[in-house]
Image: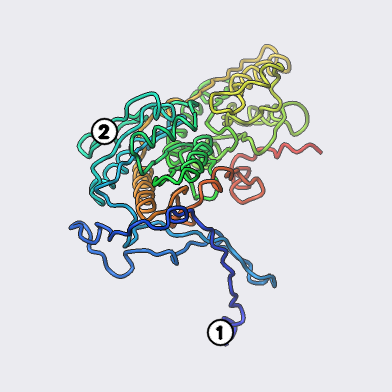
Amino acid sequence: MNDQNHLETQSIINMNLVQVPHITEYLPHLQKHTSPLEHNHFYHPSEGFYLSSSDVILRRTIFDTSDNNTLSSLAYHRAGPRKEILYDPQNVRAAIVTCGGLCPGLNTVIRELVVGLWEQYGVREIFGIKAGYRGFYSMEPVRLDVKMVHNWHKRGGTVLETSRGGFDLEKIVNAIEDHGFNQVYIIGGDGTLRGAVKIFNEIQRRKLYVGVAAIPKTVDNDVGIIDRSFGFQTAVEKAQQAISAAHVEAESAPNGIGLVKLMGRSTGHIALSATLSSRDVDCCLIPENEFYLEGEGGLFEFLGDRLKQNGHAVVVVAEGAGQDIIPRTDAQKQERDESGNPVFLDVGVWLKSELKSWWERDHKGELFTVKYIDPTYMIRAVTANATDNLYCTLLAHSAIHGIMAGYTGFVAGPINGNYAYIPMDEIAVTKNQVDTKDHNWAWVRSVTTQPDFERN
C-alpha cells in the first residue's frame, strides 16, 4: 500500500538547461589537453571525480506534487574539474582584478585563484591588475606567485587595490590583447558584472582566445540566483557587535535609543540576518519594506510604546531604507556615484535628527538620547571569517576549473548548496531581494513585534 501511494505521487520534472557560453562556439578548432589533475600527486581521480556537460544542478528544488501542471525547473552545469581542458597550462597568462568597494574575503579569492592555478594546473604566468578596471590600461600588471600571496587571506581589503569607475571597454580589451592574457578573472559586484559582460561580448566579437570568469562580490548579498555572496556571513557576524554596543548604550540611559545603520543599498539581508541573530533589536527597517514616522502604526508610535515598556530600544536600519521619504533637492536627486548608482542620503543621520525632533515636540522636558552607530567601513575592511574563507576557496577553484574547460562569460557560485556555472549576463541583471511575504520576514516581525507599516 505504501509503495502504491509512493508511485501515485511520482512526477516528472522538465529540466530547461541554461547554456553557458563556450569558447569553441567561436573558436571551434582548439586543441584539447588532458587535465594535469590526472597526474597531480595531490589528487587521485576516481570515478565521479571529473564532471561532464551532463552534470547539472536544478535551480528549483521545492515542488507541490498536488499541482496538476507539469513540474519544471531551470538547470545549470555543475562546477568542477573536467578531464579534458582547452588550455595548455604552460601557455596560460592569467589576469586577476578586483573592482568596486571592499568586502571581507577579497584577498582570499585572489590567493586561491593564484594557488589553484599554480598548484592544480601548473600555471606560472599569473598577474594582478591594480586599482580596478582602470588598472588594465593605466598601470603595469603585478606578477603573482604562491609565495607572495601565502598570507593574503589573513588581511582585510584587497592587496591589489580597487576603485570604482574607470571602465573604458576599448582600452581594457586592447590591454588584455597587448599583455597576452588568455584568462581573465573579475571579482566585483553588480556594476562590475555589467562591465564584465561587455568585456566578454567584445572578446567574443574579436574572436580572441580569452576566457572570462566572474566571481560575484557584494557584502549586501544582493546578487541573484546564487545562494549567497562571499563576505556576507562575516558582515552579519560583525554587525552583531555594533548592535550589541547600541544595546548597551540604549540600556544605560533613560529613554535611550540605539540606532545602527547597516549596509544594504537595495536589499536588507544584512539587517535582517543580524536582527535575527542578535535578538536585541526592537525594529528592523529595510529597503523592501516601506515605513513611515508619524501617526497610527508609525515608527514613532511604536518606539514610544517600547520606551514606556522597557525604557530603551534598538533600531537597525539598512542604508537603502527610507530613501523615498528623506527630503532632498533636485540636484541631489540627479547625483550618481562613479559606478552610476544613485547617491543615497544618510538615512541614519536623518533618522537620528527626526527622532530627536519628535521627542522634543511630544515629550518636552523628558530625558532622551539617541546613540547612532555606523559600522560600515569597519565591517567592509575586516578579514573573512572561517566560513567565508572556505567559501572563497571553493568559488575561486570553481572559476578556474570552468575556464580551463573552455567555459567563458560565466559566474561561479552555489545553487542550493552545489556549485554551478551561470551565464554572466543573466546574473548581472538579477537581484536577490528580501521577500517580505516569506517566513524569514515573518520571523523578524515575530521577534521584534514591530508594525508592518501598512497604512489602513
Q: Nearer the viewer, residue 248 or 416?
A: 416
Mark 2: which secondary structure?
A: strand
The answer to which of 15 and 425 lies nearer the viewer is 425
Q: Quadrant of the N terminus?
A: bottom right
Disc 1 marks a residue whose amino acid type is Asn
Residue located at (26% from left, 44% from top): 115
Q: Amino acid at mark 2?
A: Arg
Q: Residues within 10 Å of mark 2 (few under 14, many from 20)?
A: some
Viewer-proximal residue among 397 and 275: 397
Position of the C terminus by quadrant: top right
List the residue tagged with mark 2. Answer: 143
* Position above or below: 10 against 429: below
Q: Position of residue 450 (x, y in %)?
A: 65, 38
Outermost residue toward the left in this view: 41
Estimate the x, y position of residue 247 in percent, counting from the top left. 51, 28
Disc 1: which residue: 2
Rendered view: 342 above or below 455: above
Residue 434 x, y percent position in the rendering: 60, 44
Question: Which circle, 1 or 2, is nearer the viewer?
Answer: 2
Pinpoint residue 158: horizontal percent, then vertical percent: 36, 30
Picture residue at 60% right of the left edge, 35% below the top: 266
Instruction: State the separation of the CA atoms marked 1 and 2.
Output: 64 Å
Q: Is residue 33 left or right of residue 75?
A: left
